[in-house]
Image (cartoon, rainbow, N blue to C red):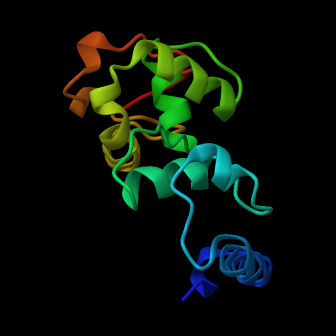
Amino acid sequence: IIYPVGFYRNKAKTLKNVSRIILEKYGGKVPDTLDELLTIKGVGRKTANLVITEAFGKPGICVDTHVHRISNRLGMISTKTPHDTEEELRKVLPKKYWIIYNTLLVTFGKKICNPVSPRCNNCPISHLCKRIGVIRHR
């Protein structure tokens, strides 16, 4: 199942370790808070936010490469790291959008707002975009 993802040996080892900790420390119940999830070795901010939003429907901002790139490109924020992006988005993005934000930007980032050569001519929000970091576009 995880073979196509890349680094599958490391990920398999981490999954086994995280599963063991959840069984031993939490009685098999996945923690539902960011702070608790972050105490588990192998669980970072992106994964912890993804778990609380997808598994528990709680507000969280899952920052992946698309969320980081597009939020900065639009000029919503100006950050260097995903952690800083999450912190700044918590300040400027209304909480009601936190859960859906990652899903929307991942799709948008794959189809329109590509890393190297974004499709600005096909972008429905190009009139709002500051194109920060865009060298060439289609």
Q: In which quarter of the image is residue 108?
A: top left
Query: 112 left or right of 49?
Result: left
* Residue 1, x across and y down, in percent: 54, 89
99 with respect to 66 (left or right): left
Looking at the picture, does residue 94 appear above or below residue 108?
above
Q: Quadrant for residue 58, please give it.
A: top left
Q: In which quarter of the image is the C terminus?
A: top left
Total marks shown come to: 0
Residue beneath the point at 52% across and 39% down: 115
56, above or below 84, in the image: below
- From the viewer's side, name the closer residue of 98 and 78: 98
Q: Residue 71: image x %, image y %?
A: 47, 24
Q: Which residue is drawn at 47% across and 12% down?
A: 75
x and y percent of residue 84 in the render?
A: 66, 24
Which residue of the protein is positioned furthest toward the left in this rendering? 124
Residue 115, above or below 23: above
Q: Nearer the viewer, residue 89 or 4?
A: 89
* Residue at 30 percent of width and 31 percent of height: 97
